[in-house]
């Protein structure tokens, strides 16, 4: 059964003094595909926002992957190689989620 989880957040860091730990957990969460992190203090917000915002390079990669997926689908391919990695539908959905959430980045 397919589950659509578009907004999945990681737990809050309860220490308001550990900005390094918050940054590391946030960056790891973004790398794992999470879309945000719970904050318990306003000072945590800028750190979390930066960690969960894709870089211009990540956005270019996502857009190029989506275009390559469309081309390969038109050619009748399901999975294909893109920049040395195997790409399939879950990878496409991850790229599409980035573009949907941060299309102007």
Image (cartoon, helix red, strand yellow):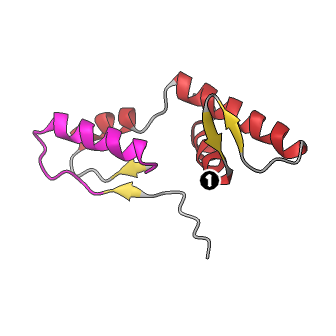
Is the residue 94 above or below the residue 84 in the image?
below
Query: Could you tell whether 5 is left or right of 103 in the image?
Result: left
Question: Is-magenta flag for residue 102?
Answer: no
Q: Position of residue 46 (x, y in %)?
A: 32, 34
Start-end of magenta stretch: 11-34
Is the residue 3 above or below the residue 52 in the image?
below
The residue carrying pointer 1 sits among few (fewer than 14), some (14 to 19) or many (20 or more) residues within 10 Å by Cα, namely: few
Furthest-right residue in view? 75
Question: Is-magenta flag for residue 13?
Answer: yes
Q: Position of residue 22 (x, y in %)?
A: 22, 41
- As helix, strand or loop, the secondary structure at mark 1 comes to helix
Residue sitting at 22 percent across and 38 percent down? Answer: 43
Residue sitting at 44 percent across and 58 percent down? Answer: 8
Residue sitting at 49 percent across and 26 percent down? Answer: 55
Q: Quadrant of the C terminus?
A: top right
Residue designated by label 1: 90
Q: Position of residue 66 (x, y in %)?
A: 72, 38
Residue sitting at 46 percent across and 49 percent down? Answer: 33
Please name whichever residue, 78 or 39, is drawn nearer the observer in this view of the structure: 78
Furthest-bottom residue in view? 1
Query: Could you tell whether 6 is left or right of 32 in the image?
Result: right
């Amino acid at each position: 059964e397919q589950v659509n989880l578009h907004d999945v957040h990681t737990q809050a860091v309860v220490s308001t003094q550990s900005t390094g730990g918050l940054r590391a957990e946030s960056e790891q969460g973004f790398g794992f595909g999470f879309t945000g992190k719970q904050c318990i203090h306003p000072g945590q917000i800028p750190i979390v926002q930066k960690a969960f915002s894709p870089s211009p390079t990540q956005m270019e990669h996502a857009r190029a992957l989506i275009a390559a997926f469309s081309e390969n689908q038109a050619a009748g391919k399901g999975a294909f190689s893109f920049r040395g990695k195997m790409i399939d539908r879950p990878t496409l959905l991850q790229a599409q989620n980035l573009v949907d959430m941060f299309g102007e980045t």
